[in-house]
C-alpha cells in the first residue's frame, strides 16, 4: 500500500534549523505513515553526514548547483507515490499531531485538493497563513506605507478563518506547509518554477490553478506549526531587501499569467506611483526616530527597485 504522506524539505542555508524541524516532525507524527525527502541545495555537504546518521530513514536528492524553491520541491513532487505530498519549509517546528490532523482532514474532505495548517510565529502569536486571492486593491495596500492607525487595513488580503479554530475553505494558504492530494497534483501539475525561479508567490499560483481545476483549498487549524520565516533570502543591512523585491516581481508575473498583461501593467504603474508617498512616509519615520538611517537606506533602495519592476516578458507555464 502507498504511504499516507511524502514530505519534501530543502537543505540550503540553515542545516541546524532543518535538524530541529526533522526532530519535531518525527516526534509529532503518531498515526500517519510517511517518507521524508531532503533536497540538498548544493551545500557542499554542510551537516549532511550528521543528518544522515541521525535520520537514516530519510531519502536525499543532491543538487550540483543552487536551485529555487519550486525547482527543488518539484523533484520530490514529480516522483511521489503517496496519497498526499507535502512541501515543508526547513524553518518550521511541527506541533504534536499536526500531520495526523492534516491527513484526517484530507481523508474527510475528498474535494479538497490542498490544505494548510494553522501557522504561529516563534512567540506563539498567529502568523498570516490563509488568504484571499490577489487583486489590484490588495497589492496597492501591500506596497503602500501607512500610519500606524491605518495598519489594520494591511490585513484585508487575509482570510478571517485564520483567526478561528474551525476548518474552512480559503483561496490560498502559506507555502511554508502545504499538503496536496495525489489526484489533484496529477491534474494541476507541479509548482511553476518559471513564474517563481527563486521563491515567492508559487503557492498562490498553485492554489489558483487548483481552484480553477475545480478543487477546494482548505485551512485546518487543528494542525499547528511554528514558522520562523525569512531565513533563506536575507539581505545585508543597508542593502536592497531582495526577498521583498522578488515578492513583487513574482506578483507581477502572477497577474500577467492569470489576469492578463494589461492588469499586470496597471500593477507595475501602481508600484511606481506610490514611490513618492512611500519615501515621504519613510522620511517621517526616520525623523521621529522610529527607524535608523541604515533602515531608511535599506527600505528606500528596496522601494526604488520595486518601482523599477516591469511586467515579466519570459514565457510562463500554461494555466
Image (cartoon, rainbow, N blue to C red):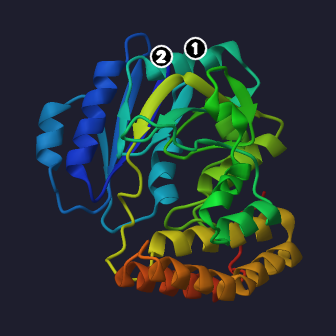
108 with respect to 279 (left or right)? right
State which quadrant residue 261 falls in. Answer: bottom right
State which quadrant residue 21 falls in. Answer: top left
Residue found at the far front of this picture: 288
Q: Residue at x 76, y 51 (%)?
A: 133
State which quadrant residue 54 falls in. Answer: top left
- Given residues 252 and 127, the one toward you in this image is 127
Q: Residues within 10 Å of mark 1 (few under 14, many from 20)?
A: few
For label 1, the residue is 104
Residue contact between numbered discs 1 and 2, judged by CB atoms under 8 Å: yes
Q: Residue at x 45, y 22 (%)?
A: 98
Q: Relative to 282, does residue 45 appear above or below in the rendering? A: above
Q: Residue at x 49, y 87 (%)?
A: 301
Residue 265 rendering spot, x and y as whole percentages: 81, 81
Residue found at the far top of this picture: 31
SS at mark 1 in the image = helix
SS at mark 2 in the image = helix
For label 2, the residue is 100
Q: Relative to 217, does residue 280 appear above or below in the rendering? A: below
Q: Relative to 222, does residue 161 appear above or below in the rendering? A: below
Question: Between marks 1 and 2, how big is the CA–CA gap?
Answer: 6 Å
For the C terminus, the quadrant is: bottom right
* Residue 80 in view of the camera: no
- Given residues 107 and 275, the one toward you in this image is 275
Residue 303 rendering spot, x and y as whole percentages: 57, 82
221 with respect to 95 (left or right)? right
Amino acid at each position: 500500500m502507498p504511504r499516507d504522506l511524502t514530505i519534501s524539505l530543502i537543505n540550503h542555508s540553515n542545516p541546524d534549523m532543518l535538524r530541529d524541524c526533522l526532530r519535531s516532525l518525527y516526534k509529532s507524527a503518531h498515526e500517519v505513515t510517511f517518507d521524508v525527502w531532503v533536497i540538498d541545495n548544493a551545500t557542499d555537504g554542510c551537516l549532511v553526514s550528521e543528518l544522515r546518521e541521525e535520520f537514516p530513514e530519510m531519502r536525499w536528492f543532491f543538487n550540483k548547483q543552487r536551485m529555487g524553491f519550486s525547482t527543488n520541491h518539484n523533484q520530490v513532487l514529480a516522483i511521489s507515490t503517496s496519497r498526499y505530498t507535502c512541501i515543508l519549509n526547513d524553518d518550521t517546528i511541527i506541533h504534536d499531531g499536526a500531520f495526523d490532523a492534516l491527513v484526517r482532514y484530507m481523508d474527510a474532505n475528498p474535494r479538497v485538493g490542498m490544505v494548510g495548517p494553522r501557522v504561529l510565529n516563534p512567540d506563539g502569536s498567529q502568523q498570516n497563513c490563509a488568504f484571499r486571492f490577489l487583486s489590484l486593491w490588495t497589492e496597492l495596500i501591500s506596497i503602500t506605507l501607512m500610519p500606524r492607525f491605518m495598519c489594520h487595513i494591511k490585513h484585508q488580503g487575509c482570510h478571517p478563518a485564520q483567526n478561528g479554530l474551525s476548518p474552512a475553505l480559503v483561496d490560498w494558504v502559506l507555502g511554508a506547509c502545504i499538503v496536496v492530494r495525489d489526484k489533484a497534483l496529477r491534474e494541476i501539475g507541479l509548482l511553476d518554477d518559471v513564474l517563481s525561479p527563486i521563491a515567492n508567490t508559487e503557492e498562490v499560483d498553485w492554489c489558483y490553478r487548483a481552484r480553477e481545476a475545480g478543487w477546494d483549498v482548505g485551512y485546518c487549524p487543528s494542525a499547528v506549526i511554528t514558522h520562523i520565516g525569512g531565513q533563506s533570502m536575507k539581505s545585508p543591512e543597508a542593502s536592497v531587501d531582495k526577498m521583498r523585491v522578488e515578492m513583487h516581481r513574482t506578483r507581477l508575473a502572477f497577474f500577467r499569467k492569470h489576469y492578463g498583461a494589461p492588469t499586470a501593467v496597471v500593477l507595475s504603474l501602481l508600484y511606481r506611483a506610490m514611490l513618492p508617498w512611500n519615501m515621504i512616509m519613510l522620511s517621517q519615520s526616520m525623523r521621529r526616530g522610529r527607524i535608523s538611517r541604515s533602515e531608511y537606506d535599506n527600505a528606500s533602495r528596496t522601494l526604488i527597485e520595486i518601482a523599477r519592476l516591469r511586467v515579466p516578458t519570459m514565457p510562463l507555464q500554461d494555466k
